[in-house]
Amino acid sequence: MELKEYPDAEMMMMDLADRLASELRAALAQRDTVSLAVPGGTTPGPVFDVLSGMGLDWDRVHVMLTDERWVPEDSPRSNTRLLRERLLTGRAAAARLVPLYLPGAEPEDRLDEIAEGLAPALPLDVVLLGMGADMHTASLFPGADRLEEALTGSAPVVAMRAPGAPEPRVTLSARVLREAMSLHIVITGREKREALERARHLTPQEAPVAAVLKQAMVHWAES
Ligand code: 6PG
């Protein structure tokens, strides 16, 4: 794991957006299409705001979430909605969205189709992850019903239900995250920094973020 500390969150978000854009450009120089996976939640919005204005061949970029809550896009809890509002706008509006949610009562109803849609975008080129103070990342939550499958199985996407998560989730598996060409984690605040330090000494079953820490560059600012 590499840890990059920033004087403040604003500088971190700018620097991170720059870094992601450079990595995408480098990948675009090698291949016709490249892929970018990003988290939902409250932290990454400012990165999206900067990244969406950056000049690169967005029409050759497949964009997806690292995980989605099983809610329709008009729900305020929809990460896809956040993506559309903050990342797939401006220059980045030309990017292609690979959905992790399709209308249906339960994730299992559409999981095969989601996996099929994802397949051409694998292995992922650039991944940005968030992390919770409980040491979850993507929707790999401690105590989740299919955590073991998502940590050790070969499926690219897993449906997940976890104590404390109000709705079912769909998450990229640890395998897909680890196979990414480049992997970043963005966190803010003391509480998450302390959680990150704890996770370094725990198993992925106890602290799911530990499953990807070896490959990751972690970006942190106190506030
Ligand atoms: C989600 C996310 C999730 C997120 C962490 C951190 O749907 O909630 O994708 O994995 O990255 O929970 O969330 P915050 O940035 O809101 O603290």
Image (spheres, rainbow, N blue to C red):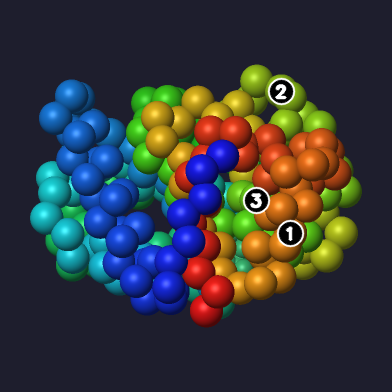
Q: Nearer the viewer, mark 2 or mark 1?
A: 1
Query: Which image quadrant for residue 212?
Result: top right
Horizontal and vertical percent for residue 215? 53, 33
Residue 153: mark? 2
Q: Residue at x 46, y 40 (%)?
A: 183
Task: Report how far apart the C-alphas of labels 2 and 1 lie in the structure.
Answer: 25 Å
Q: Is mark 3 within 8 Å of ligand 1?
A: yes
Query: How far across and down, in percent of the image, does residue 5 sit?
Result: 48, 61
Specify the quadrant of the image occupied by residue 148: top right
Viewer-proximal residue among 173 and 75? 173
User: Label 3 crowding class (10 Å Cα cut-off): few <14, some 14-19, many 20+?
Assistant: many
Amino acid on which disc 2 is placed: Gly
Which element is circle 1 on?
A: helix
Q: Is residue 17 above or below residue 143?
A: below
Residue at 77%, 37% in the rendered image: 204
Can you identify the residue that label 3 sits on? 137
Horizontal and vertical percent position of residue 61: 25, 42
Q: Quadrant of the N terminus?
A: top right
> In the figure, is residue 209 to the left or right of 27?
right
Task: From the viewer's perspective, tell me whether residue 118 is left or right of residue 134.
Answer: left
Disc 2 C-beta below 8 A from ligand 1: no
Residue 63's disc number: none
Label 2–label 1 contact, CB within 8 A: no
Q: Mark 1 and mark 3 in contact? Answer it, CB < 8 Å.
A: no
Cα separation, mark 1 vs mark 3, equals 12 Å
Q: Earlier in the sequence, mark 1 or mark 3?
A: 3
Instruction: Inspect the image, locate mark 1, and give the three-letter code of the amino acid beneath it.
Output: Ala
Question: Upstream in the sequence, badge 2 or badge 3?
Answer: 3
